[in-house]
Amino acid sequence: MLSNFPLMVIALVVYNGIAFGLGGSSSNWDAEIFALDMLSGARWDMRMGDIIIALGLLLLFFEVLKATRVGKRSVVDHLLSTLVLIAFIVEFLLVPAAASSVFFILMLMTLMDVMAGFSVSIRSATRDVSLGG
């Protein structure tokens, strides 16, 4: 059952934990976490929003890998991913703390997860042809 857990819900929970735990301010996402001086002389800084988006990309990668599975479990996985997407959309439309570009990008990643899951499943189902009894 753990393999059917939609990983993008982790990004949703982390976002909400930061947004509501720190007062729901948009300045939470602009907070500098660390900075490095590059060899070019430029300064590279990582902000809270950048880290959340990087986490979302990592989770999306594993979700796409999970989408390549074939079987009855994949249907449950796609259904749960769709429910997470619906939660993202509802929160984006109704909750003021979710009205940020970081949340919107996470929502788009979840949409890509749902679309990739269904696309991979449909594509692999067309190749899964059994002949005879």
Image (cartoon, helix red, strand yellow):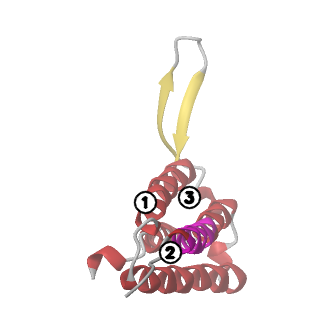
Checking the image for residue 117, the label placed there is none
Q: Left or right of 113: which side holds 1?
A: left
The kind of secondary structure the magenta stretch mainly shows is helix
Badge 3: how crowded within 10 Å, few (<14), some, or many (20+)?
Answer: some
Q: Distance between the residues labelled 3 and 2?
A: 10 Å
For numbered disc 1, what is the local secondary structure?
Answer: helix
**Residue 28 is covered by the magenta coloring:** no
Q: How far apart are marks 2 and 1 (CA)?
A: 31 Å
- Which residue is drawn at the image coordinates 56% and 53% (left, top)? 49
The N terminus, quarter of image: bottom left
Residue interval drawn in magenta: 112-126
- Which residue is drawn at the image coordinates 43% and 60% (left, top)? 65
Mark 1 and mark 3 lie on one chain; the one further toward the N terminus is 3
- Which residue is drawn at the image coordinates 42% and 84% (left, top)? 132
Judging by the rendered image, the residue that carries numbered circle 1 is: 65
Residue 55 or 48: which is nearer the viewer?
Answer: 55
Mark 2 and mark 1 lie on one chain; the one further toward the N terminus is 2
Judging by the rendered image, the residue that carries numbered circle 3 is: 28
Judging by the rendered image, the residue that carries numbered circle 2 is: 20
Mark 3 and mark 2 lie on one chain; the one further toward the N terminus is 2
Q: Left or right of 29: which side holds 63?
A: left
